């Protein structure tokens, strides 16, 4: 008999539901697991979502009051998938109650909040996980292995982008993501966090940054709480409200190892639909990956055979790469976004079961907000700014 890990979920929108589906199917996908996840209780402020949690997902209970999740004796792990500015209150309460904590990125709405959440988790000694799910894409893990084995030589430069169209329609609803008091920062928290996290994983820490930001669509139709998703649209005659955080974030960076990098993220451009992508260049080769082709990696290795003509090779995902075979056997049978979330959740609960700190956890969250803090300073000063480590052992 495996021990049970009781899970309580706060926020039952896109990601709360995605994680809940993951916990339900971990037993069917991971025979080597050392535990069995059990859904215990879910909190959401919208009644229809609570009904769905109980009626369709099999949560024994759902509540409007997230405190009941944190206080529930059968909950071992609290999963925070609510809007970012609620994260601090939820995460600190969960840690203080001694619950292990999985929080969606960016953890908090501001760097200061992230620092306080990380401090609470450290004080409580709980295992933490952070929703940097793209780390768990099998082909990204393979890219990391190739880089670690020196196949690209010395890394010289890195380009990361997250171009999403979720805010490209001016009639896109003014949901929480577009409001500083509910989301905290805009794309720098929402999607630049993923882009920089992958750069941290694949290249290493960033020493300095010069940044720029802009809000291109400044008014949007007002949304009702819990209405649709951030892809939902309103009507031209709906009352409008002001967008209060950034649509676009750009940065040039110098990594601590001397490599150079460029990042761009946008939610309002027209064309690229979900280009969470990177290109990484070294003295002996390069690799490119793009979420829009999650199951493909482009690889160029200069020492492959030395013959001409040469060019990038497309490598298809398959069961020879980490975790892929848990979902589908063979080569080029595709996996998708939620499969990656399931790998992420399996790995986090494995750390919880072992009582070991997880990676990525709060340290990875602090790595990102330390970068974000310097990026924000640079957006204001217009100058290059040094990245100073926030949090434990850092300057704040
Ligand atoms: N890792 C990823 O790929 C990824 C993708 C999307 C979102 N996210 C993150 O996940 C989190 C949630 O984003 P989402 O897209 O799922 O948002 P969403 O709007 O789809 O869902 C948020 C849910 O929280 C609920 N909620 C609001 N206030 C609440 C409260 N006081 N108590 C309980 N529930 C409350 C809302 O009713 C809604 O159902 C954010 O931190 C976001 O940055 C991560």
Image: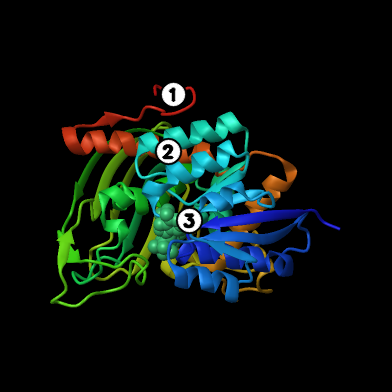
Q: Residue at x 53, y 49 (%)?
A: 67
* Distance from mark 3 CB to nearest ligand 1 atom below 8 Å: yes
Is the C-beta separation of discs 1 and 3 under 8 Å? no
**Picture quadrant where residue 375 is located:** top left
Q: How many marks?
A: 3
Q: Is residue 163 visible?
A: yes
User: Mark number for residue 172?
Assistant: none
Distance in Å between CA atoms under marks 3 and 2? 15 Å
Q: Which residue is mark 1?
A: 394
Disc 1 element: loop
Label 3 Cα neighbours within 10 Å, binned few <14 / some 14-19 / many ≥20: many
Q: Which mark, by number, is residue 114?
A: 2
Number of the label disc, if any, that sits on residue 81:
3
On the image, which quarter does residue 222 sit in? bottom left
In the rendered structure, the answer to whether residue 239 lies left or right of residue 288 reads left
Q: With respect to residue 369, does 222 lie above or below?
A: below
Where the C terminus falls, by quadrant?
top left
Taking the image as shown, residue 381 lies to the left or right of residue 186, namely: left
């Amino acid at each position: 008999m495996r021990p049970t890990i009781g899970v309580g979920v706060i926020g039952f929108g896109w990601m709360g539901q995605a994680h809940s589906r993951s916990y339900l199917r971990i037993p069917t996908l991971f025979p080597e697991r050392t535990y069995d996840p059990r859904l215990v209780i879910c909190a959401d402020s919208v009644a229809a979502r609570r009904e769905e949690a109980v009626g369709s997902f099999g949560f024994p209970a759902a509540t409007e009051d997230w405190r009941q999740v944190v206080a529930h004796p059968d909950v071992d792990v609290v999963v925070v998938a609510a809007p970012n500015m609620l994260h601090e209150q939820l995460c600190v309460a969960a840690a203080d109650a001694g619950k292990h904590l999985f929080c969606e990125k960016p953890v908090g709405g501001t760097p200061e909040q992230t620092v306080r959440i990380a401090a609470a988790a450290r004080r409580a000694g709980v295992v933490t996980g952070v929703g940097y799910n793209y780390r768990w894409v099998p082909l990204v893990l393979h890219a990391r292995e190739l880089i670690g084995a020196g196949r690209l030589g010395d890394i010289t430069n890195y380009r990361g982008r997250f171009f999403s169209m979720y805010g490209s329609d001016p009639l896109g609803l003014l949901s929480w993501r577009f409001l500083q008091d509910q989301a905290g920062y805009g794309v720098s928290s929402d999607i630049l966090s993923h882009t920089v996290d992958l750069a941290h994983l694949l290249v290493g820490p960033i020493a300095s940054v010069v940044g720029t930001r802009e809000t291109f669509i400044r008014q949007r139709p007002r949304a009702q709480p819990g209405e649709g998703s951030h892809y939902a649209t309103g009507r031209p005659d709906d009352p409008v409200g002001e967008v209060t955080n950034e649509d676009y974030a750009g940065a040039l960076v110098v990594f601590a190892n001397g490599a150079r990098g460029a990042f761009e993220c946008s939610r309002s451009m027209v064309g690229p639909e979900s280009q969470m992508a990177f290109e990484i260049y070294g003295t002996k080769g390069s690799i490119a990956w793009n979420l829009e082709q999650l199951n493909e990696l482009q690889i160029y290795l200069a020492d492959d055979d030395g013959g001409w003509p040469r060019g990038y090779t497309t490598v298809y995902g398959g069961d020879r790469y980490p975790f892929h075979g848990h979902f589908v056997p063979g080569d080029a049978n595709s996996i998708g976004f939620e499969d990656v979330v399931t790998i992420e959740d399996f790995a986090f609960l494995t750390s919880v079961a072992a009582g070991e700190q997880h990676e990525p956890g709060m340290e990875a969250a602090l790595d990102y907000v330390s970068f974000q803090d310097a990026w924000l300073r640079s957006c204001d000063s217009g100058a290059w700014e040094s990245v100073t480590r926030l949090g434990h052992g850092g300057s704040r």
